[in-house]
Structure formats: C-alpha cells, structure tokens
Image (spheres, rainbow, N blue to C red):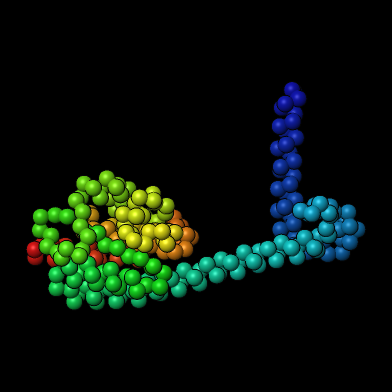
Amino acid sequence: MSSDVKAIDQVEETDASEAQVVAYLKAHPEFFVGQDDLITELYLPHDSGKAISLLERQVTVLRERGLEARQKLGNLLENARNNDQFFDTTRSLVLALLRANNTTELANATQDELTNHSNIDACEIILVAQNNLNVSESIRTYPPNKLKQDFKDVFRLKRTYCGALEKWQVEFLFPGCSESLKSTALCPITHDGEVLALLAFGNKNEDYFNVQLDTLFLDFIGHVVGAVLNKQLVKG
C-alpha cells in the first residue's frame, strides 16, 4: 500500500473516531461528572492564546449562543413591528385609492399615504406614458422605452428590487433629495403582468432597504395600485 493511501486511511479513521466521540458525548452529557483528573488534562485553546478549563469554555459558548438567540429574537420583533406598520399603511392606502376619482388623485393618494410611513423618507411615483393616460402635469410620466432601459431588471422580474442603484438612477428617481437617501427600493406597479408605473422608496439609513428585506407588503402594494390604476386607464 502506498504512503498516500495510508495517509487517506488514517484521515478517514481519525474522522470516524472523532465522529464517534462526538456522538457518544452528545448521548452522555454527564460523562465528565466525576472525571476531575481527565478534565485537568484537557487542553482547550483560547483566542488569547491561553488554555482555559472545560467549564470556562462551556460558559463562554453558552454566553455566545445566548447573545445570538437574543439578537435573532430582536430581529424577529423588529420585523414584526415593521410588518404591523406596513399593514396599517396598506390599509390606509387601499381606502384612499377607493376614494380616488381619477388617475391624478390615485397617484397623489399613493404618494401621500406611503410617504407617511415612518420608514419611508421619500416616495415617488412615475407612470408609464401611454395613449389613454390622462393626468395632471404635476404627475411624473415617462415613455416606456426609457424606463425599461434605465430600470430593465425591475421590468424583467416584475417584483420589488432592494439594493444599490447607480447615482444617476437615484437622482432620476428622487430629484432634489437624492443626496440624503442612502438606501432605496423600486416597486413595479403591475396589472396582468404589465408594468404600469414605478414606485420608488428612499430611506436615510443605508441598511434599511437591502437585499434581505422582506418585500411582501411592497409587492402587494404594487399589485393593489396596479389593479386600481388599470381601471382608471380603462375609463380613460
């Protein structure tokens, strides 16, 4: 047998032995009770370079896991609070949309209601220009080709995008206040798979709108506004 094969066999045997020891200790957590001599011979390296006792190591591990558990719980509670706020905002938005008599009122209501959310520092709505679109000049509209070119990923995926945007994109979405915004979200307003408008959200905290953010409510808002907007477009 070659030396390489022997080395592989030794590694596999070591791994198997370690796995067996781990399994045994998990099945017998009281093993070290009464094993004072063995405990004194165990060597547990520490980040500081000093050896620590098994008990000290156990306390350290439990403390670290406790901190991790509290952090996870804090994140869950924060997400729950954010979801409650988004639910209240969504409810107010739906009621405002039902009271809108035309596309201009719909766009203004959407922007006003969403701007009231505590975690939204800026909100802009941009409608996709089309023949049957009749809105006030105060409402932003742009040709579909330009929007598709500038924000092609949103038009392709048809769901909310949270993440870094180019500086010129942020300046286009939030004219006059782009410098103060550190994170953004871009939500397509859709109906039957067609993007009718874009909703842009900005926050002064660079970590708020990020790729890990749950976009369930934002996507829902995009569908709700899209359904009502489509009715207004049909009416002309």
Please provide percent x and percent y for residue 79: 46, 68
Residue at 84 percent of width and 54 percent of height: 51
Residue at 34 percent of width and 55 percent of height: 171
Q: Nearer the viewer, residue 163 or 223?
A: 163
Residue 75 seen in the figure? yes
Please provide percent x and percent y for residue 72: 56, 66
Residue at 26 percent of width and 69 percent of height: 110
In what quadrant of the picture does the N terminus appear?
Answer: top right
Please provide percent x and percent y for residue 172: 31, 54
Q: Nearer the viewer, residue 109 or 51?
A: 109
Count of numbered badges drawn on the protein: 0
Please provide percent x and percent y for residue 194: 21, 54
In what quadrant of the picture does the C terminus appear?
Answer: bottom left
**Quadrant of residue 97 within the rendered picture:** bottom left
- Say whether residue 31 is left or right of residue 113: right
**Quadrant of residue 136 within the rendered picture:** bottom left
- Residue 169, relative to residue 180: is it above or below? above
